[in-house]
Image (cartoon, rainbow, N blue to C red):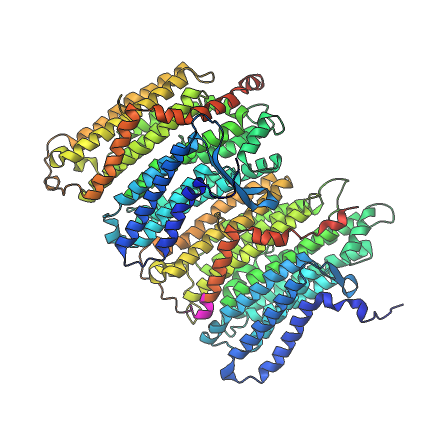
Amino acid sequence: MENTGFSLLTLVLFLPLVGFTILLFIREQQESAIKWTAFGTSLVTFVASLLLWIGFNNQEAGLQFVQRGEWLPSYGISYYVGIDGLSLLMVILTTFIMPIAILSSFNSHIFHERGRVKLYYLFMLLLEWAMIGVFVAQDLVIFYIFWEVTLVPMYFLIGIWGAERRIYAAIKFFLYTMAGSILMLLAILYVGIQAGTFAVPEIIAGIQNGTISFAFDGLFSTQSFLFLGFFIAFAIKVPIWPLHSWLPDAHVQAPTAGSVILAGVLLKMGTYGLVRFCLPLYPEASVAWAPVIAVLAVIGIIYGAWVSYAQTDVKKLVAYSSVSHLGFVVLGIFALNAQGIEGGILQMVNHGISTGGLFLLVGMLYERRHTKDIAAYGGIWKALPLFGAISLVVTLSSMGLPGLNGFIGEFTILLGAFGSDVLGFFYAMFATIGVILAAVYMLYMFQKVYLGELDKEENKNLPPLMWNEIAVLIPILIAIFLIGLQPAPFFNTMNASVGELVAHVGQFVTTVAQAVP
Amino acid sequence: MFEAPSFSSLNLDVALPGIFLAGWATLLLIVDLFIPKERRRLTVWLALAGIAVTFVLNLVMYNRHEEAFKGMFIADPFSGFLNIVILLTAIMGILLSVDYLRRTGIERGEFYSLILFTTVGMIFMAGANDLISVFVALELLSIPLYVLSAFRAPDLKSEESGLKYFIMGAFASAFFVFGAAMVYGATGTTNLPEIFSALGGLGQPGGPSVFLMILGAGLIIVGLGFKVAAVPFHMWTPDVYEGAPTPVTAFMSVGAKAGGFAALLRILIVGLPILTVNEQAAAAWQTTLWLIAAATLILGNIVAISQSNVKRMLAYSSIAHAGYILMAVAAAGTPGIGDQAAQAALVYLLSYMFTNMGAFAIALSIEKDDGSGTGIDDFKGLGKSRPLMAAMMSVFMLSLTGIPLTAGFMGKWLVFQAAIQANLIPLAIIGVLTSVVSAFYYARIIINMYFGEGEGDSAEGATSYVRWTVYVAFAGTVLLGVAPMLVTTLTDRVSLAVSMLP
């Protein structure tokens, strides 16, 4: 299974870096060459990642496309990549969002003000490389390296091309997420030293056959501290209430493409980490802490929705809606059953598409009017009918309307939470309130911005959509309908992997019941 | 009683790199007198050639493990690796000095000889296997540095720098000698392996006195703590670093640290690992170093936040980085961790060397001829005026923060690993949290260069010598971050604690 020669996965991972290197040698003045190189690279990466999906065997639970090579042998660290169903979907989501994000910035006004086109696309490709790396790394150290590296390009994207308060937002983003992840570094070291390896599959195998175990005898034991070391890093990234305060700042100040990537992929790194590392490495602690975390998730669902409703800034509204939506994902994951986790994973994809789409739409409005104030809009549908119609679909998808993608994910999560051994009826019930609130704030936003009278002079002569704006919205619409009407291929892809994970975690439920009364 | 040793029994070839460089430095001092003023460059090239030869000699001898001067000096991979760090620092320090000395009007030939002499001191420090030779090397390291700090005289800040460094340094040496005397009093020897053997009978009748040993070890730690700028012996650092000519600051921030840590690690790991209060426990000095490391990390990182001058900021940052290396030293106190901790400290020193020399080189580029222009605000807009330099400075700052794919991450990674392996988890937690604090002030440089408004300095100090130093530092920083195995193959051979095996 482990090959050292050519690997499609390694190719997908390093394609963005190839584009990055090419970009380095293009001169700053050749703007269109820079843009098209960046876009072309991300498109080729997307196609290559689709080949991964075609070659992927749905029946197999373990890792596929594995490649392993030595990196720092004397310290037990290896370049170890591989994907299962979960990783595959996240990789595809990344490679799907990136060309969209890059294409959407082609004609952006930010370059008139701030310039540095080349630097911008360099950071884009660096970011794509690091994000794919996070989703395919199977060695804890390699994972951590990619995880931290994603911070740097995003920090620059916000700091250089962001809005008025970009410096504050950039530094807050950087420090907040670094503070979380650096404790994970210690936990990784501890796990690596105890287990004698940093390779995740080997550690999990060791836990299953009893050669590796992290002492667990309650909510505060060695295993729980290790679990929390990882969990806090992921929780800040997701973000789980009450660790979300960096998110609105980062989202609102980031340039459009930055927000799209942030919502589309970066936040998913957190939820991905929960499924990939927290659950299998610390099954007992996961079971023990599940109710606590689920409560936080439910609070996040309702809080995020509530705060969204109160916003006057349309970008902030979408930002807070992320807190609510990702609350659902976390709830699904910590239901610790197949339905919940599968729903959670699908909802990660859905949120990436829908919220990414919403940020694109907000960005397009901002390009035309240079304000994010909801009150400045109204009747946009009349001014830009096509734009209004697309916006309606994306908004409904984000709300979770049946037939569109959001519904499938949320519904499966609620089923999972309801039938869960560790959660139950009340969690599902309160989460359902969040679904209703989502309809409230989304429709409120839609009504204020798109419907009503076209009474503001500035809104009457908005320029129509440009070719690249239409080009980025079409794939979003296709994905929304595809997942909404045909979710089966997505579930099939992750079925086997999730099944194995649930079986692995499930065998610890009774041990935990004895340890934690 | 006293018998003169035969010449051949001294094993002089083992200490060849140091001896060669010492001879070369002396010759250079004389030769320089005959070089006309307008051909001053020749001195530079001669100095560099001497270091280059020493570098090659050192690489040739890297794998040897032999003693010289009747056991007072030892050549092993530990000293071999440190010599690499020290000699690279010296090369970069000289390259940075060439045009800087010219444009600030302090170009004098002795400068390069002094650099070579202090480098020799560092090399002997790395190989010193006896408290006496540590002391001699320490003085040889320090005295030229006092002069170099004041090289900008009659500039007041530079004079203050030299005088302050001298007085503090003299105190530190005194502490060290006093400590060495205590250890000698307890064990009857100054040779490190012999001290180790004598400690086997610690506290037993006729054996070394626990009181004298603890006191002696404590004073030695204080003396070397001054040299490496550990809290609470750090007070001199910011003033000296700010006042000294910038190339000297860059050179001593790494070189003096390498020398100090070399002695500290060798004395503690070779000589005193079993200085314990009760059997099977960690060494008695571990707690002391734990506290010093924690204080150094916290104070260095927090005070650095409020600095507005980049040289002072880097001074506090250098205190903070001493704290990370001290984490490794403290970890060495746990039985069985000694070698791993020493290796971590070595990798850390190398990574700090590349990164810090690069950062100082860029600070030096924007410095004006009168020594002004080193404020944090002077970096504003550098991303526009000098994009390449700003990009590299960003990488240096990220490396000092410890972001992956840079040398700084590998250093921190290994140091934290050693600390956790030694079960010093609270210290490791302090270490990572202060790293987050450090991100704040390093990021501020990046903010000024890229995010803010401003025209940007033209960085006229970035002459070709300086630029090449930056490129080398950048290459080292990235290479060590991406391909650390290139360095760990060298450090894997480092073994200080062999004597602990029965």
Numbered disc total: 0
Q: Residue at x 69, y 68 (%)?
A: B16
Spot occupied by residue B30 in the image (x, y as percentages of width and height): 62, 81
Q: Is residue B390 visible?
A: yes
- Tell me where residue A195 sits by quadrant: top right
A151 and B192: which is toward the camera = A151
Q: Residue at x 53, y 85 (%)?
A: B36
Q: Is residue B231 visible?
A: no
B170 and A266: which is toward the camera = A266
B436 and A482: which is toward the camera = A482
In the picture, the quarter occupied by the N terminus of chain B is bottom right
Residue B145 is left or right of residue B205, and the answer is: left
Spot occupied by residue A24 in the image (x, y as percentages of width and height): 37, 56
B44 within the magenta span: no
Residue B255 is left or right of residue A369, and the answer is: right
Spot occupied by residue A125 in the image (x, y as percentages of width and height): 36, 47
Q: Residue at x 41, y 18 (%)?
A: A417
Q: Residue at x 51, y 83 (%)?
A: B37
Residue B104 sits above or below residue A331 on the image: below
Spot occupied by residue B314 in the image (x, y as percentages of width and height): 49, 57
Extreme-right residue of the structure: B1
Give, as a single range, the part of the protein colored magenta: B461-467
Residue A272 is left or right of residue A216, and the answer is: left
- Tell me where residue A359 sits by quadrant: top left
